[in-house]
Amino acid sequence: MHNSLDRRSLLQASIAAAVASTLPRTLFAADIVFADIPRSEFGFDTTADEVVAGHDLSGKVILITGCNSGLGYESLRVLAASGAHVIGAARTQEKAEEACASVAGKTTPVVCELTSMDSVAQCAKDVQALGKPVDVLMANAGIMALPKLEQVDVNGVTLEKQFVVNHLGHQLLTMLLLEQLQAAPAGRVVTVSSGGHALAPKGGILFDNLSFDDGYQAFKAYGQSKLANILMTNEITTRYAGGDSQLTANATHPGIVATNLGRYMRGGKPRDPDTPMRDGMKTPAQGAATQVYVSIDERLNGVSGYYFGDCNPEETKGNYATDPALAERLWDVSAELVEPWLA
Ligand SMILES: NC(=O)c1ccc[n+]([C@@H]2O[C@H](COP(=O)([O-])OP(=O)(O)OC[C@H]3O[C@@H](n4cnc5c(N)ncnc54)[C@H](OP(=O)(O)O)[C@@H]3O)[C@@H](O)[C@H]2O)c1
């Protein structure tokens, strides 16, 4: 199982032993560790517009969750401008319509409120009703570090809200759209994770405490949900990549980006556009580059189960994100939680 990760671990171990003390200063470890993965010419400063430059995405269908703000909105804008038919999902019809109407190109607004599995299932139905393969599911929507514990009831089970919004709703959406993704010539699931996956609690995913009733901490819960974004793409790789289907799944992290994501720590206020950028921060145009690159670049056909930052493969942090047993268990537990909506 987990072919690409097994290959990667073997490659990493043998290469690390061989070059540990002799690495020339001009060679970066990532170039060697990911020797079997195409590297792009892009980097920290690259914008999503630069990633799509020269690409004609006509005929591609791309579904983006959280299309009305930050990274999702920038992705919607550049992908639609490049000819893709972008299905823009937002929590309400008004938000989805407003976002889609404000960009050039072919778009379809849909509702996807990720705290409601009924809404996720209806979103999948709306997408299926278009009668087209889905080339990309960009699982972008997210919430971060809710100061106080918030919970969602899913079929009688109480779950911490970041786990539901950031991960569970996206797993249901993926499962319901699997046929459409597999019908595309090179279907892709792209999650927008975060370097914050390193903040996940001991054990990675708290299967016995998914409500987080016990010991809630805002960034631990966020870290768990962002780790889940990586584990989900790894498990899709194990289950569905290769073989007849050209489906791939990869996780991305955008960097630290000036979007509205910090609103939960600001009592709900969106980011003031006049707030100066801190060192090391990206604009939304730069932040969206990696998820757009992993969604469309043809060099990545067949590449699955990896984690990308600055438009290139990167190492995840800690041991949980590459643990195949954890990925399998998360998929199974999540599938069980959303089972009523899978029928
Ligand atoms: N910004 C960063 O520095 C950073 C760093 C690492 C990772 N990320 C990841 O990037 C992704 C996009 O975040 P962003 O920075 O663009 O933040 P953002 O500007 O706050 O956008 C978040 C999007 O998610 C949507 N959303 C929130 N709750 C939802 C729900 N219950 N159902 C459906 N959609 C919901 C929001 O809709 P509403 O506007 O209607 O609430 C919004 O469209 C997130 O997954 C985040 O974890 C961001």
Image: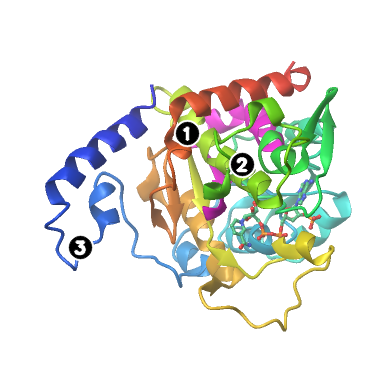
Range covered by the magenta-colored residues: 169-196
Residue beneath disc 2: 224
| Place of residue 130 in the rendered image (x, y in percent of width and height, measured from the top left) | 71, 36
* Mark 2 Cα shell of 10 Å, populated few (<14), some (14-19), many (≥20): many
**On screen, 162 above or below 196?**
above
Q: Secondary structure at mark 2?
A: helix
- In x, y percent, where is residue 68? 75, 59
Q: Nearer the viewer, residue 45 or 83?
A: 45
Query: Which residue is label 3 attached to?
Result: 27
Left or right: 81 in relation to 2: right
140 sits left or right of 121 in the view: left
Q: Amino acid at mark 3?
A: Leu
Q: Quadrant of the C terminus?
A: top right
Q: Report whether 278 appears left or right of 12.
A: right
Residue occupied by mark 1: 234
Q: Can you name the residue that lies furthest to the top here?
A: 343
- In percent of the image, x 28 and y 33: which residue is there? 7
Tell me which residue sits at (77%, 53%) in the image: 146
Which comes sooner in the sequence, label 2 or label 3?
A: 3
* Observer-nearest of 235 and 86: 235
| Residue type at numbered disc 2 | Gln
Q: Would you say the residues marked 3 and 1 are in contact, meaning their CB atoms lie under 8 Å apart? A: no
Type of residue at label 1? Answer: Asn
Q: Residue 245 at what x, y percent from top left?
A: 45, 26
